[in-house]
Amino acid sequence: MTNPNRLLYELEGAQGQRFSPYVWRTKMLLAHLGIDYQSQGVGFTDIAQAAGGGFKTVPILCEAEVCVSDSWAIAETIIDKTDGALFGGPAGRSFARFLHDWSSLGMLGPILRLNAVTIWQDQAPKDQDYFRTSREKRFGKTLEELCPDPLADLKSLSRVMRPLDSALGGQPFFGGQAPVYADYLLFGNVQFARCTGPHDILSQNPSLEAWFERCLNLHGQLGRSEPSYTERHAQ
């Protein structure tokens, strides 16, 4: 059930797809804790006016006229209102914070380079110019130049993720027998790849691949409620 008094702003593509890695972290967290909300999709160029203005990124979670932006800030706000167990204790919080910082360069950067063109293609016309201009300025290259050799980039990304594959160590989740916020944080990264491009980024890391399938099935298969890029373009 949606809660009209709690509003989550999230990125929306031209076909209504919800693909932000940061938003998916928040959606899985809210689902884990049974917190209802109403979703509001926004394009890249709508973010500045969302939730009364003043925000640069999503997710933005608003309740009782109080809005919090940034997935990490939202996680701390929500988890700290409970018993804090979803971080897995102080050590788990530190581990999650490390993953948050590391994954921006180690995972999200390579995924963005792999899928930059398809992400651009899937935006509404008003958002395409913004996405192209901002990302080409960031990388100093055209979107088409960001990934001249996808196979080489996939191999490199697989090597980066290999320690994550090993860290599962035969357990179903990074939190052990049940997921913690670190699982949702990493899930958002892989879901971003699943929703924005045709590349299978997990095939060389079987434990990580099995973990992602388990995560997709959590909370009434919430992750599967968003079609993958391949599924959308096969329709």
Image: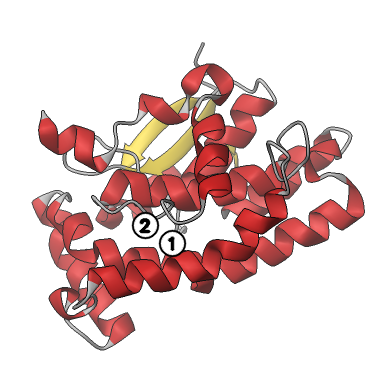
In the rendered image, which quarter is residue 142 located in?
A: bottom left
Residue drawn at (46%, 59%) of the image: 54
Residue type at tag 1: Lys
Do we see residue 59 in this rendering?
no
Residue drawn at (57%, 21%) of the image: 219
Q: In this rendering, would 157 be left or right of 67?
A: left
N-terminal of the two: label 2 or label 1? 2
**What is the distance, in whole Å, between disc 2 and disc 1 at their CAs?**
6 Å
- Placement of 128 over or under 29, stated as above or below: below
Q: Position of residue 102 (x, y in %)?
A: 61, 70
User: What residue is shown with label 2?
Assistant: 48
Q: Nearer the viewer, residue 133 or 90?
A: 90
Q: For label 1, count other residues whose C-alpha is less than 10 Å away and answer few (under 14), some (14-19) or many (20+).
A: some
Q: Nearer the viewer, residue 13 or 126?
A: 13
User: What residue is shown with label 1?
Assistant: 56
Q: Nearer the viewer, residue 101 or 110?
A: 110
Label 1 residue SS: loop
Residue drawn at (49%, 35%) of the image: 8
Label 2 residue SS: helix
Residue drawn at (46%, 64%) of the image: 158
Q: In this rendering, would 178 be left or right of 118?
A: right
Residue type at tag 2: Ala
**Most distant residue in the bottom direction:** 140
Q: Are marks 2 and 1 in contact (CB under 8 Å)?
A: yes
Q: In this rendering, would 32 be left or right of 231?
A: right
Q: For label 2, count other residues whose C-alpha is less than 10 Å away and answer few (under 14), some (14-19) or many (20+).
A: some
Q: Position of residue 155 (x, y in %)?
A: 38, 69
Give the image's coloring scheme.
Answer: secondary structure
- Placement of 77 over or under 5, stated as above or below: below
